[in-house]
Structures are given as C-alpha cells and as structure tokens.
C-alpha cells in the first residue's frame, strides 16, 4: 500500500504543477479526456451521485455513454476521488463502459479531499487519511461493494446482461478483490494496479478471497515487488487454488505509475497497463 516511506520518496522527486507539466504528466492527464468547463465529452453523460450504504451515503462520480453499457467501479488511490480519477473514468466510458468512481472516505468527508497528488503531499495527506482509512476494514469494503453493485444494477445506463468490472489503484487494489467477493455473481473482473496489502498473514487477506468466476489482473510495481517479493507467488498459488483466471505481472515502474498526477507516473507503462485492462474487460464482461 502507499505508505509513509513511499510518500517521502515521492516528496524528493518534486510535486509542483510546473514540474508535473514539464514531465508530461499533466499533458497526459488532458489527453485522457476531452472535458471542458465541466461538460462531459461528446456522447457521454456525467454526474455526481449519492449511493445508500449500510454505513451512510457514499458520494461518487458516474459517467456513461448514451446506450446501456457494462458497469465498472473505479476505486481510487490514497488521494481519493479527484479530477484525475474523473478523467480516467471519462476515458474508460469513451470505450463503452458505465463508470462509477467511488469516494472511499465518504464516512468522514465528501470528495474531493485533495485537488491532486501534489495537494495531498502539501496538505499532510497521509496523516489526514490515516483515521479515514482505518474504517475501511474488509467487512466495511464488502458492505460498500454490495451497495455499489446494487446501485449500479438499478441504473438505466447499465447493461445488466453483462458482468461488472472493477479496478483499483494503490489502496484501491484490495477493494477490487473484496468487491468481487461481495457480489460474485455480478462482478466478473477485478484489476489491481500497484495495489497494496493484497497478501497479508490475516485470514481476511485479499489473496484468500479470490473467486472462481472472476478474472483478475494484478499489475505490481517493481518497488512493491522488491519489498514483498513473495506476494506474486502467493497470488498465483491462490488463483490456482480458487480456479480463477489471473494475470500477474511485475511492471518496470514504481508504485503509483498508472495515475497521471502521481510524481512517478510512467506514461509508457501506464498505457501498457491500460491496454491490459481493456483486454480483461473485453473478455470478462
């Protein structure tokens, strides 16, 4: 998971908007969406929504094409639901999916909690989110997963004849596994990008929750693999034991590489991961 050591490493790389622009990260973000002035790209409809859960009401961003489409849930990284996540959702919606970006911190504060990752760092983000994250127990995530799936199945924009996909980044990686476990008859794909805490010594460890009828994609950062080299082997063994299809790969990029406002964003490897995501959804949903 995105921890304090990783964040300290990010800080040393520089996080100003000028530095992001110089590295091409903001340009890549702009390329993800043709959004201007709060209006969705041509053919897409978007809105903020409120989803009833067992613990309250979750605010979320929902974007979808004109015709009913298979649903996808996007679980954000540690910096939460912000503009970059909306841009990523719009890009996916442009590929023909009804995409919902959840606010994982809804129990404490509505989105956005931070404007971008630079704001997260400048605002003492790790300290702020620590008590919020503490409430996201496996049981709580499963409750949220059930609620989001139920809400999506009630939307006219969603094609209920197709399976639901879900993808997560950083701390959102485990959410994808728990969501598939929460609604195994509906969630047919789970993709974790530089996900943290996928393999633990607890009985509720995500790798022990894999489902036979869900297809998985685990894209692992090279520095995450260096810290926990046995995780990929445990994931493979767990997938085989569950009879689940699973693509497991260590990418030559660091934790956070898929998100355009991350200081370690790697455009080439992010695009490769994006292509694998589309392949996963095309086959499973």
Image (cartoon, rainbow, N blue to C red):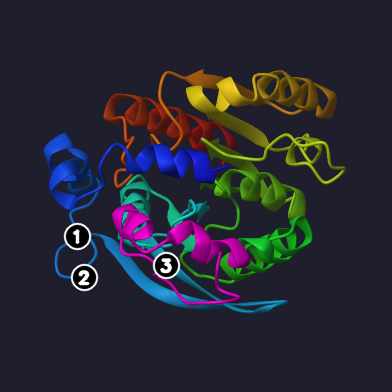
Marks 2 and 3, how far apart at CA: 12 Å
Residue 72 lies in the magenta-colored region: no
The residue nearer to you, when weighing 32 against 141, is 141
Which x, y percent locates residue 18?
Answer: 12, 48
Residue 110 lies in the magenta-colored region: yes
Residue appearing at x 16%, y 37% in the figure: 24
Residue named by callout 3: 61
For the C terminus, the image quarter is: top right
The residue nearer to you, when weighing 117 against 111, is 117
The residue nearer to you, when weighing 205 against 96, is 205
Residue named by callout 2: 38
Camera sees residue 232: yes
Residue named by callout 1: 35
Please say if the residues under marks 1 and 2 sit with CB atoms less than 8 Å apart: yes
Residue appearing at x 78%, y 60% in the figure: 139
Q: Magenta residues? A: 103-132
Q: Residues within 10 Å of mark 2 (few under 14, many from 20)?
A: few
Number of numbered discs visible in the structure rendering: 3
């Amino acid at each position: 998971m995105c921890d304090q050591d990783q964040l300290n490493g990010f800080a040393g790389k520089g996080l100003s908007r000028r530095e992001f622009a110089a590295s091409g990260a903001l340009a890549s973000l702009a390329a993800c969406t043709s959004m201007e002035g709060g209006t969705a790209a041509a053919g897409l409809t978007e809105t903020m929504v409120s989803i009833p859960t067992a613990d309250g009401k979750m605010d979320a961003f929902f974007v979808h094409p004109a015709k009913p489409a298979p649903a996808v849930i996007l679980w954000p990284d540690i910096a939460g639901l912000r503009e970059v996540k909306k841009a990523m959702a719009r890009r996916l919606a442009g590929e023909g999916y009804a995409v919902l970006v959840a606010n994982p911190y809804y129990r404490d504060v509505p989105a956005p909690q931070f404007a971008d990752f630079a704001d997260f760092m400048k605002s003492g983000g790790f300290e702020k989110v620590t008590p919020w994250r503490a409430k996201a127990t496996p049981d709580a995530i499963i409750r949220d997963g059930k609620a989001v799936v139920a809400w999506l199945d009630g939307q006219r924009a969603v094609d209920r004849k197709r399976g639901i996909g879900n993808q997560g980044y950083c701390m959102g990686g485990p959410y994808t596994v728990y969501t598939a476990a929460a609604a195994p008859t509906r969630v047919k794909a789970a993709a974790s990008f530089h996900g943290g805490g996928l393999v633990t010594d607890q009985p509720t460890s995500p790798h022990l929750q894999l489902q036979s009828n869900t297809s998985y994609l685990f894209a692992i950062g090279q520095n995450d693999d260096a810290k926990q080299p046995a995780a990929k082997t445990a994931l493979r063994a767990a997938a085989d034991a569950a009879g689940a299809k699973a693509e497991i790969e260590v990418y030559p990029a660091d934790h956070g590489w898929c998100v355009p406002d991350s200081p370690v964003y790697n455009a080439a490897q992010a695009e490769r991961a994006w292509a694998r995501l589309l392949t996963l959804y095309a086959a499973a949903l």
